[in-house]
Amino acid sequence: MRYECIECGSIFPLEKKLYTCPKCGGLLEVEFDLEKVKEGLDTKFLETAPLSVWKYRPFMPILDDSKIVSLGEGGTPLYRCERLEEELGVRELYVKYEGANPTGSFKDRGMTVGVTKALEFGAKVVACASTGNTAASLSAYAAKAGLKCVVILPAGKVALGKLAQTVMHGARVIGIRGNFDQALAIVRRLCEEKDDIYLLNSLNPFRLQGQKSIGFEIADQLGFRAPDRVIVPMGNCANIWAIYKGFWEFREVGLIEDIPKMTGIQATGAMPIVEAIKLGLKEFRPVENPETLATAIRIGNPLNGPKALRAIRESNGTAEAVTDEEIVRAQKDLARLEGIGAEPASATTIAGLRKLLRVNAISEDESIVCVITGHILKDPQEIMEVSERPVEAPAEFEEVVRLLE
Ligand code: F0G
């Protein structure tokens, strides 16, 4: 196992605590000797053991198993969505429901690995900037590991459920009067200047290693087969890359034959990657003042933008942007046709699918998986704003019956 810079290709030993390439500042990726992993694979175990992040232990970059910090993450449902298939006009549609993770989002898959690495490196404090879910997840895993947790947030811009989790798990929370991109710049500097604070934003390559397991599980749940396409919301752009990497590694070791077309969705008010894909730009152009009701992905300068561009291009995928109105419609479709509760950022996947089908960028014959990244209860305020209020009535039978007519 080793770090590899995605820009200059330099290699570094995994025992070193690194976030970016010491030579060129590029993003780092963790690479394995996959031939060795392949030789050691227990296919019987893979076919029969229950799903979880740690089922795929040979693909996880841990040096000391005794340090593993787990809350039972992964093993989330893959729902076949027949009513949505009919509504949207597609043959085979699934939802990978990441809201079923311990803190209600996919971030837990990354944190089980990231916080384990924090212990391996001997850190006493962990830190992140967040639009909410990273904070909720990190604060829970830090609590489990007995580590202090520092969180920098855009004040007043984080959904209530996520903030509530973070404060209850005991993190030190600072809300800055600014946006996520500014919070991230502050926390990066903090971790550079204070060596005992370990950075757990998605610049940290180990978190992405845990998130790869979304790709592993989807393939596993389909009987060791890749779907034609996987649709993912993009904010800081780590997850789309991580899922791509999961499929890529499974193909390298011979567990699946193909890699799905990775398709990323952003909100129209925060769409730097979509713009770069549509215009064929080599590098994306950051958005100064990102805006969308999907606060989780209100990000203008995505840290892992270069990795997202690579995942989309190498897999022959695509990208699309959706409006707040389209997001709310998709959120209601998921909730009312399938019984699936999604936070707004997650519903972008269904909104994006609808749009891409309409412009014939996706064929109705494809098998498609939409990744629903976060639970509906993460953002209760948004739900009440976009839904009809319950009617009130006197506590009398006739009055209630009259209202139901
Ligand atoms: N969906 C949800 C629910 C998220 O919380 C996030 C990111 C994303 C999608 C996008 O994933 O950043 O890997 O492209 N939330 C981060 C946070 C930024 O701080 O919780 P990405």
Image (cartoon, rainbow, N blue to C red):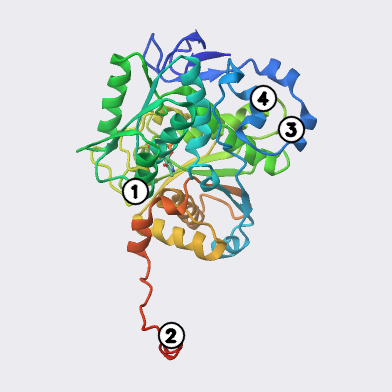
Q: Nearer the viewer, residue 125 or 80?
A: 125
Q: Is residue 76 above or below residue 82?
A: above
Which comes sooner in the sequence, label 1 or label 3? 3
Q: Viewer-nearest of labels 1 and 2?
A: 2
Q: Is residue 181 visible?
A: yes
The type of residue carrying mark 4 is Glu
Helix, strand or loop status at disc 1:
loop
Which comes sooner in the sequence, label 2 or label 4? 4
Labelled disc at residue 400? 2
The quadrant where ligand 1 appears is top left
Helix, strand or loop status at disc 3:
helix
Spatial CA span between label 1 and label 3: 37 Å
The type of residue carrying mark 1 is Ala
Label 2 neighbour load within 10 Å: few <14, some 14-19, many 20+: some
Which residue is labeled 1 in the image?
159
Labelled disc at residue 252? 4
Labelled disc at residue 46? 3
Which comes sooner in the sequence, label 3 or label 2? 3
